Image (tube, rainbow, N blue to C red):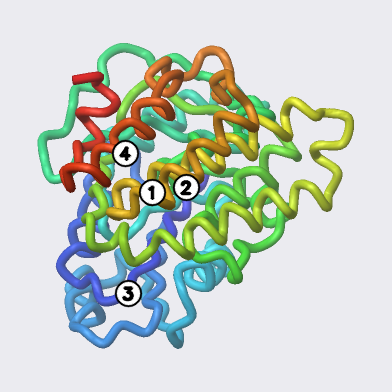
Amino acid sequence: MRVSVVIPTYNSGPLVVEAVASVLAQTRPAAEIVVVDDGSTDDTAARLAAFGPAVRYVRKDNGGVSTARNRGVAEATGDWIAFLDADDVWHPRKLEVQCAALARRPDLCLLGTGTYRWPGAHPDPGAEPVVHAVRFDSLVVRNCLVTSTVLARAETLRAAGPFDVALCGPEDHDMWIRVAQRAPTANLSVALTGYRLATPNSLSKNTDRMEAGMRVILEKLERNGVFRGQPLLRRRAWSYFRFSCGAMRYWAGEPGAAIRHLVRSVVGYPFSPITPGQPRKYTFARLKLIAMAVLVGVRGTRRTAAEIWGGR
């Protein structure tokens, strides 16, 4: 397996250096690292030059992360492509563990991993991880594949088509759905990717485009006949979309919009839209969020995501 690592970056000089360093520290080396600079105006180029020939630096005009990933896929020469965002890092054994799992499961075309909070300490990956299949109907409802964890077969990835540049936010979900229509996908039961959480400010700025993008994905699925003859799958997918929008609006400080989305989610599908085997924390999350959104309107206070999911 020749693994090409594609890293899109934009004005993330200090962070992308950390991302690249985590790839170079892999116990199972990658064949190449392709960093696509999406028109940065900071010192990204100078910082990456310090790595020398270990990094293939590709610069392009600014066009968004989808255009950068598409360029990276086009430049990659490996038969497998791994994605890593500039603000995330990998566990030193990520490629080793993933490639070993893929050797045991040659039917898979895409394999993700769990994540852990970064900055922080790398966790112990432990014994041989379990490969959990990602069912297509589950993926249609909810994206359970984190981009920086994904290792995908290049041939299948290219056959699925490019990342949709019209989507700003959920373009990765759209891609994984198209890949999963062609061959089996899965996640490893171990956290091998350090994930940097978004700040509240970035969430507030991105809520509108995320909501619009998720709607477009569902409309695509409708047009392509994915829901034909599967009315419950359609209801679950739209219900989870409303749930996600309600959660984003709540955390962005918009309780009225959050309540409207969450009520429509419950009415559209009163049971948990998440399929069996997924975290039970989602079962009553909509009702908790409705109650919390009402309290925000009355008291002007807001509980954190951890408090909501943990039931505290």
Of the two numbered discs 3 and 1 in the rendering, the one whose residue sits closer to the viewer: 1
Closest to the observer, 115 or 251:
251
Disc 4 element:
helix
Residue at 40% from the left image edge and 82% from the top image edge = 59
Residue under label 2, please give it. 245
Considering only vertical position in the picture, is 258 above or below 283?
Answer: below
Q: Are marks 3 and 1 in contact (CB under 8 Å)?
A: no
Residue under label 1, please give it. 248
Which amino acid, mark 4?
Val
Disc 3 element:
loop
Q: CA distance from mark 3 to mark 1?
A: 24 Å
Q: CA distance from mark 3 to mark 2?
A: 27 Å
Residue at the extreme right of the image, as rendered: 229
Residue at 32% from the left image edge and 40% from the top image edge = 293
Which amino acid, mark 3?
Tyr
Q: Is residue 61 left or right of residue 22?
A: right
Residue at the extreme left of the image, as rendered: 120
Q: Is residue 175 left or right of residue 143?
A: right
Residue at 23% from the left image edge and 43% from the top image edge = 298
